[in-house]
Image (spheres, grey):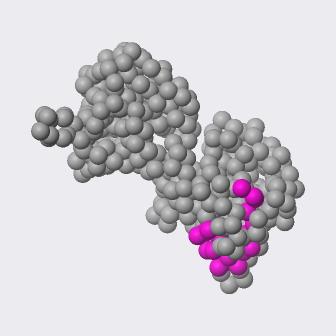
Amino acid sequence: MKITVLKETDAGEPRVAATPETVKKFAALGATVTVEAGAGAGSSISDADYKDAGATIAKGRAAAVKGADVVIAVRRPEPAGLEGVAKDALVVAIMDPYGHEAELAALAKTGASLFSMELMPRITRAQVMDVLSSQANLAGYRAVIDAAEAYGRALPMMMTAAGTVPAARVFVMGAGVAGLQAIATARRLGAVVTATDVRPAAKEQVESLGAKFIAVEDEEFKQAETAGGYAKEMSKEYQAKQAALVAEHIAKQDIVITTALIPGRPAPKLINKAMVESMKDGSVIVDLAVERGGNVEGAKAGGTAKVKGATILGHLNVAGRIAATASSLYARNLYAFVETMIDKETRALNVKWDDEIITATLLTRGGKTVHPAFSGKEGE
């Protein structure tokens, strides 16, 4: 059983799908591990580190995928990058399937079975495989660090002989995994933190971290969560009421971090230009949803925007900005998932195709797109 670790081809992707730790774990399951040369460079893992863990280093993609039973990566590989892969191979990565049905169809033609890590169901035994949570957690942390760097003042209150420095006011919009970590990090740095979310359950979580909850708490608010724990899209009426409350609050903030995303949809607009312009000179906004269109009007994907005295940060792949840590967590997510497909006694692949974590994440098999959400057969 050969497991191949691909080198990412996207210049903005420093993460890697395996670490020396997980290479050793795969070997303990009976696998031989091949790593494409240079795969770990962006995460401070050398080819020598992989060799020491028992992996073989392949010079080039063709040599890496040849004979592979399982191919693991961070981002969805290009079809050309899987040329020569076995037709019954398993390919596991963050596939970003929404809106990319044509790319999935092209990959399906390789015959490989593609699994999308971000479609992992939110059930207890899959928590260790939840790549969205592991990476969002780090993005929330890094968002505060980036904001603190761009903010020209100290975050904590300081009482000095020269006078008192007031604490910075930080407002976090969206209290999911990223938002809660942002709250916790800003609190650790001494800021006065407030937060908002459309999900009622978030209020208790926000307050447990020592932040104040800000929201229009009407009847619609009480019903604003899906069975899977995601935020529902709110009505125009609710959005207007919430926007009015938020607009008043934002004008008093030093740092705002937005994290609102709905799977498969463009990011909801939470902050308009007028709100940004109402903020004090030197204030900072971090838009963590910029890759999906952004929560903030005027945010620049992959760059920094200035609106009057405010700075809007639109960094891409924020978790990748702390690549070594992000890779270590992502690699463990992948290992936990792939492990479920390996028979411990025969030390060979044995995929249970009717397992709910398999059916939830399987995109293509046998040359076709099979996931109902992306095959055009949803609801059948």
Q: Which residues are magenta?
A: 20-38
Answer above or below: position of 354 versus 277.
below
Residue 296 in view here = yes
In the foreground, 149 or 137: 149
Q: Which quarter of the image is occupied by the N terminus?
A: bottom right
Outermost residue on the bottom side: it is 345
Which residue is pictured at 54% across the width and 28% down the height?
303
Answer whether residue 151 is magenta in the image.
no
Q: How many marks?
A: 0
In the foreground, 191 or 267: 191
Percent across and percent down for residue 215 are: 27, 33
Percent across and percent down for residue 111 are: 83, 55
Q: Quadrant of residue 231?
A: top left
Which residue is pictured at 52% across the width and 59% down the height?
329
Which residue is pictured at 79% across the width and 56% down the height?
112
Q: Which quarter of the image is occupied by the C terminus?
A: top right
Which residue is pictured at 27% across the width and 39% down the height?
155
Percent across and percent down for residue 320 are: 55, 47
Taking the image as shown, residue 356 lies to the left or right of residue 261, namely right
In the foreground, 302 or 240: 302
Answer whether residue 24 is magenta in the image.
yes
Residue 194 in view here = no
